C-alpha cells in the first residue's frame, strides 16, 4: 500500500476529484482518501508511474506534498 500526502483538499468534492484523478493512472486501485489527514492510500496493481500520478493530481488542482 502506498500513502501520499495531498495538499489542497477541503471537502468531499475534493476527495472525489482526487479519487478520480488517481483512478485514471495505470496500476492504481483501491483508493482511499482520508480528508482529515489529507492522505490518499492505494494499492499498486502494477508499478505506478509517480510522475504521471503527480501530473494527474496537479491537473485536478491539488498537490502531492513534497513533490
Ligand atoms: Cu473541496
Image (tube, helix red, strand yellow):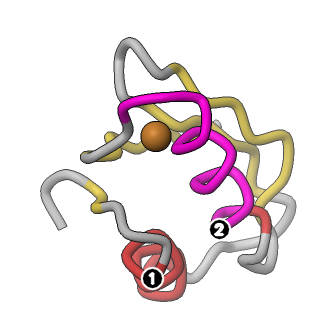
State left or right for residue 16 relative to residue 60.
right
State left or right for residue 58 relative to residue 27.
left
Name above or below for residue 12 compared with residue 18: above
The C terminus lies in which quarter of the figure?
A: bottom left
Residue 35 screen position, x and y as percent: 47, 22
Name above or below for residue 38 compared with residue 51: above
For label 1, count other residues whose C-alpha is less than 10 Å away and answer few (under 14), some (14-19) or many (20+).
few
**CA–CA distance in space, label 2 to label 1:** 8 Å
Element under label 2? helix
Q: Residue at (52%, 44%) from the top-left corner?
A: 14
Principal SS element in the magenta part?
helix
Q: Which of 14 and 58 is in front in this view?
A: 14
Q: Residue at (72%, 77%) from the top-left corner?
A: 25
State left or right for residue 65 relative to residue 26.
left
Residues at badges 2 and 1 in contact (C-beta under 8 Å)?
yes
Residue 54 screen position, x and y as percent: 40, 75
Give the magenta range: 10-22
Q: Residue at (58%, 54%) from the top-left corner?
A: 18
Q: Which of 20 and 54 is in front in this view?
A: 20
Q: Name the residue under label 2.
A: 21
Q: Is residue 14 magenta?
A: yes
Q: Quadrant of residue 17?
A: bottom right
Which residue extends farthest left?
A: 66
Residue 51 screen position, x and y as percent: 42, 86
Name above or below for residue 2 compared with residue 19: above
Q: Residue at (37%, 39%) from the top-left corner?
A: 9
Q: In which quarter of the image is residue 64?
A: bottom left
- Going from the N terminus, do you reach mark 2 or mark 1 first? 2
Marking on residue 59: 1
Q: Does the magenta stretch include residue 11?
A: yes
Amino acid at each position: 500500500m502506498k500513502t501520499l500526502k495531498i495538499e489542497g483538499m477541503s471537502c468531499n468534492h475534493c476527495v472525489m476529484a482526487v479519487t478520480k484523478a488517481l483512478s485514471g493512472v495505470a496500476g492504481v486501485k483501491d483508493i482511499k482518501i482520508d480528508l482529515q489527514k489529507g492522505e490518499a492510500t492505494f494499492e499498486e496493481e502494477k508499478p505506478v508511474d509517480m510522475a504521471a500520478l503527480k501530473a494527474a493530481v496537479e491537473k485536478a488542482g491539488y498537490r502531492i506534498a513534497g513533490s
